[in-house]
Amino acid sequence: MGDEWWRNAIVYQVYPRSFADSDGDGVGDLAGLRERLPHIADLGADAVWLSPFYRSPMVDGGYDVSDYRDVDPMFGTLADFDAMLARAHELRLRVIVDIVPNHSSSAHPWFREALASPPGSAARARYHFRDRPNDWESVFGGPAWTRVADGQWYLHLFDPAQPDLNWDNPEVHDHFADTLRFWLERGVDGFRIDVAHGMAKAFGLPDAGHPYQMALRNSLPLPYFDQDEVLEIHRSWRKILDGFPGERIAVAEVWAATPERLARYVSPGELHQAFNFDYLDAPWSAPALRAVIERSVASMRAVGAPPTWVMSNHDRVRHLTRYGGAEAARAALLLMLALPGAAYVYQGEELGLPEVTDLPDDARRDPIWTRSGGAEPGRDGCRVPIPWEGTEPPYGFGPGASWLPQPKEWAGLSVAAQHQDPTSMLTFYRQTIAARKKHLRSAPHTMEWLPSEEGVLRFRRPGGLTCTVDVSGGRVEPTGNTVIATETAAWTLGD
């Protein structure tokens, strides 16, 4: 499995409730994941990242945790987790699990105790209670404060069912340190840290001072995101990870105003990786992509960390839809996997799944949909369960109907339909990942831009592999020895 495996890894994200259902309740689970792990191994991934599977009321898809050290019955048991983990390791797949430290569920025993305790109590000190709210806004819309029966207000940067934890409280630090050790001792290979920029709040919880905070959160400093003190928390976690064998890692979900701010989270002694949302959010345009790539590579090189690249995840419209179709999605894969650093693949993108934009209103579950009164579609469209086989829903996802309805047009996109097709998206992903491992696995994290026409990105990696992508949709004629190509993109060796 190699030293510093994470620097060049390909990590496959599993959204457990939408991956594979073993018991017929319509929701994916750990036993279903265990049975389908060979698909991920065959794809060529190095690791699997699991979105939350912990005990939860599921108000926000499991990101409202009521017990950080147990499996929700919806997904199985701790024994099911152990069996899945063992099978993954048999297949030489590392396993990264989500940790949600910014907030707990309102059903967490701590918060229930806080509501039953008076203002000023030790129970309330684990959260942010105050007599008057400030002007902070929720990521999910509306104010970030909810009033309780005795008149105090509590902070929730997300849904009211997700009260923010007070990281000035030593009990909170100790609880999560013990939680990390609990899963590390079970054998997990690392953690993806949800809202890794959000745990520390500015002293005194001052007003942000302006409206529309969520629309401006990536361009203006906010007193509840990206505070310097959050790095102290991550440094303490890095020490815990370093105390276990086998290069256990932490990946930060961070929203930062600049790549330089982002780089602080992966400086020496901090975390191993941080998601590059500037790349995910960049439009399919040569100037925009080149600018993001150049700044991302430079900022990571300055602190000795690998860049990371991702095009889709459980919170974003699938990139095949954003980029305008399958040909652009293939070209985008060649671009992403040629870049230096680590890459993340979201379940279903290897099948060419589009965003599902026509879900029935009564099927939607995302709190963004409900809190906006239907004004915002939410994230359910990228969370529809993936198709495995067959010609009708649920396409082998499980014995019964899936928790979100699958389009009738997906029969040709199933794993079984694409498995033996040499022209399919699945085959293309397997071939591209294999080519990356052959030609770029040990390459230094450097790249050289080459002269190119307008609308074209062209660069060379150490070892002589050249990537050419015509983002404008024009045809690319490979020069040199072709490694892999589409109509609009190519990898070649030599001049």
Image: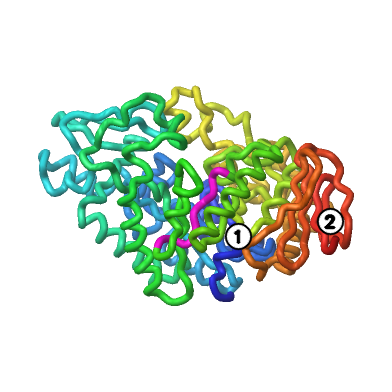
Q: Which residue is drawn at 35% across and 68% down?
A: 240
| Percent x, y of residue 53 | 44, 54
Q: Residue at x 41, y 64 (%)?
A: 78
Residues at marks 2 and 1 touching, judged by CB atoms closer than 8 Å: no
Q: Which of 6 and 305 is in front in this view?
A: 305
Residue linked to disc 2: 422
- On the question of residue 28 being in view, the answer is no
Q: Is residue 226 above or below residue 50?
A: above
Lateral position of residue 312 relative to residue 78, left or right: right
Q: Distance between the residues labelled 2 and 1?
A: 28 Å
Q: What residue type is labelled 1?
A: Gly
Which residue position holds label 1?
341
SS at circle 2: loop
Q: Where is residue 492 in the image (x, y as percent from the top left)?
A: 82, 59
Q: Is residue 159 above or below residue 375?
A: below
Magenta part of the chain: 270-278
| Residue 60 falls left or right of residue 391 | left
Residue at x 74%, y 54% (from the top left corner): 459
Q: Nearer the viewer, residue 223 or 177?
A: 223
